[in-house]
Image: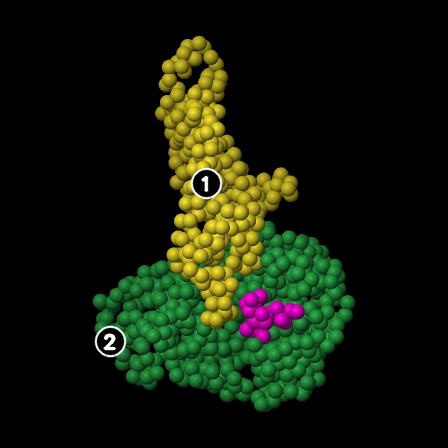
Chain colours: A green, B yellow
Amino acid sequence: MVRKAKELTLQEQKRIKDELKDAHDFDPRDPLFGLSKDQLSGPSISRRASLRLLAASGALSAWHLMPGMTRSAIAQNRGGDLVAGWSGVGEIVTLDPAQINQVLQFQISSHILGGLTHLNADLVAEGDMAESWTVDDSGTEIVFKLREGVTFHNGDAFTAEDVVFTFLRSKDPDQSINGGLLANVASAEALNDLEVKFNLLAPQASFFVKTTERASGRALTIVSRGALESMGASQYGLTPVGTGPFRVTEHVLGQGVKLEAFADYWDPSRPGVDSINIIPIPETEPLGAAMEAGDIHIIGGNPVPAELVDRFAANDELVVDVIGGNGFQSLFINPWRDPFKVPDFNKPLAELMEEPGFQVRLALAKAIDRERLIELALFGRGVAAYGTINPAMGFFFEDDLGENSNQRFDPDEARRLLASAGFPNGDGFPTLTLKAGTPQRREAQIIADLLKTVLNIEIDIEIKEFQVLVPEFQAVDYDLLRIGSGGDFDPDDGIVDFMQTGSRLNGASRDKDAMPFGHFGEAVVDGEGTEQSSTVDLDQRRALVRKVNRITSDKVASGFLYHPVDTLVHSKAINFPAESRIVGLVDMDRVTFN
Amino acid sequence: MSGYLIRRLLGAAVVMFAVATLVFFMLRFLPGDPIQTMLFEMGDADAVERLRSKYGLDQPIYVQYWKWLTRIVVGDFGNSIYGSRISVSQIVLEALPRTMSLAALSFFVALIIAIPAGLISSLYKHTKLDHAVTVIAFLGLSMPDFWFAIVLIIIFAGNLHWLPAIGYAPLADGFWDWFRHLILPAIAIGTPFAAIIARMIRSSMLEVLQMEYMRVARSKGLLTFRLILVHAFPNALIPVVTVIGIALGILLTGTVVVENVFAIKGLGRVLIQSILNRDYPVVQGSIFVISAIFIFANLLVDILYTVIDPRIRYD
């Protein structure tokens, strides 16, 4: 198990603090973020430079620097057939990076397809399909030198044309849903068979660690033109051909994906096993039984169900590794419906506090004991949330927000606010409906119970499929709705995507005449939320982020509930090296049997 | 008989057309948007509209219906609009053998339990043995199949490690592998049906055993074994076959919960998954196939009547 921050030695704490400080110590006006172009060029980027790039993109957190997240020797026992259970999913609908829209899909595709770079667990951006690269003085022209002699699984040679083909395909909205990830890339051109040049619109700190990264990149995850043309996009989505450490031997929708070690993989030290059989397991108990019976060696896919974690942790045959996750989960409160109607959030907070609609919103937010919710619904695995900025964003996260936020748990004050709004002891309060996704049934019931206990109000639970919940969330068609976000490494993922009037997840399909904003609209959040996004001075950005985050918290943009954690479970029969432990991913190419 | 068959087949075509049409329009009234969900984290409003147009979902519903109808006439059920967009035919054809395997084994399990239980119960009516079989039958009937499935997993996979908790192996991989993956779900599915069929055999047998020809046979001194299996049981089968026919239809399509528990992608799970994804072409295609299965299972039962009881004629 990775230790908690408070369990670290003083030396370790000092090292983390120094590394964080150094990573963020650069002139924000410098397009190369205080790094020379030699430091940015590769075959690999140093740990210090990588940390700097991650910091500049807002993706660096203290979790990345925790002991245990370091390179370890690969065990020597190679071979064997690994079986992985993919949690909470009925089928892997696609492995084509152009169509991938779920983490559980690119967790698999990253074993089959390659990117130009690969971020290892030391946070060193290494060349994956690229052998080295150079950056010009402006930071906008990047030339990658590709590895020579690399072949796709079908025997085709990998060349610069494949990179350009991938780029153009990803940019084409008819072929790819991930073109938005390349918004800052103006063009790509093949200089020769082994060199490709990218022209960026502006220097982009995250280019090497996000855009070209083999797992999360997606838009620049290299696809085989020959295979695509011969098998068609549909079949390619099932059995993609790439340059990765494994090739697909079989993919039967709903039954699983079988991978076999690619004998001609460019790195002879990988993969560590002969094959991987990935089986989707939609239900919780069969997943637990399969893990305990040794039918599967490791769990990937959706987060391990909370109710299984303690059971697994008590099992001597299993390893349970919990690290900080990234995201937030919220209770959204419709500001266009009584009794919590607030048509204008621009008023000063003191003025809002006098409005009955706002008083009810705040009463709901203050009545939820987050710690109790986490204990009951998540079996203690989560961090109380009071805003969108999560602990994995280390530098931006505000430790004491929970103590100072208007939303902090205070049952007496919640009851007083409800009484002040005209509902003493919940008398006369209408029965509300709380909409939640199927997996959140238990959580929704606990929220309803907590609110009933404190405020004496009735809440009906309405469980919806995600496919129905999302459109209703976007149409602002709910009293209360439980939804959230995952995979958030940057403050923009919460603030820009959810909290601004124009956010794409702020009632995008609402009736805009009747509702000028969706669940929240506030001028400072709109203005300074946008400003923080383009502010490269990190201290300034942090100040803006924290200010905006606090406003969304104090003015109850939503009732923030918790930040989830990332849990990896595997059998002790296998060796899962620390260098493969990357939040949200399940890298199995270095896994070996003990 | 042939005239009857032609009439039934024509009737089947009309029913299937009606089912297909009904499903097409009902699906469009279901809440939920496949495109918006597909692009939840990625797309803006423009991207949603672009994809909606790409799949023809922006066209008037009658245009969509006409296009779909003209395609299925030539056997083209279209492509999934979710994920890899593979053809509906491929999805259904991949799922069908799994469902048929599971249904066949479940059916076998049901009969293996039901026939002896039903016979014993009828031959020892109102005895302790009959009461015991009746209690067990009601127990089997009242257990939710998903609960029973989980109990089986906990015992045989989790604790004893005898059988796999999840997955499916095709028959081509070998009988034992196929059998050990399917036996737990088959027991979970087959047990409630065994209870129904056993009760039906009991009541039907009690009726037949009171017939005059049975009294005659007994007075002729026939052995009990021959009396039961040759004279009584075949004559008690007509109502049982009706129930078995319905059960077969349900087994071939309605095992979704157990399929989900054991992570077996059969036809039922294809249907549920596609409904959850609002994957319209797959929902339409799989319901079309499921309705065909039901119709032909019933037709098969009707034909079987004539085999069991030669007095039955449809001409």
Residue at 53%, 53% in the rendered image: B78
Category of crowding for the residue at label 2, using alpha-carbon neighbours closer than 10 angstroms: few (below 14), some (14–19), many (at least 20): some
Residue at 44%, 75% in the rendered image: A503
- Three-letter residue code for mark 1: Ala
- Where residue B55 sits in the image (x, y, percent)? 50, 61
Residue B232 is left or right of residue A489, and the answer is left
Q: SS of the residue at dot 2?
A: helix
Magenta part, dominant SS: helix
The quadrant holding residue A241 is bottom right
Alpha carbon distance from label 1 to label 2? 66 Å
- Three-letter residue code for mark 2: Ser
- Where residue A289 sits in the image (x, y, percent)? 53, 51
The quadrant holding residue A243 is bottom right
> Along the line of sight, which residue is nearer the eye, B100 or B176?
B100
- The residue labelled by disc 1 is B13
Q: SS of the residue at dot 1?
A: helix
- Where residue A422 sits in the image (x, y, percent)? 22, 73
Residue A533 is left or right of residue A557, and the answer is right
The image's mark for residue A420 is 2
Residue at 42%, 31% in the rendered image: B242
Judged by depth in the image, the label closer to the viewer, 1 or 2, is: 1
Using the rendered image, report if marks 1 and 2 lie on a common chain. no
| Magenta stretch encompasses residue A299 | no
> Along the line of sight, which residue is nearer the eye, B274 or A444?
B274
Residue at 71%, 60% in the rendered image: A153
Magenta segment range? Answer: A165-182
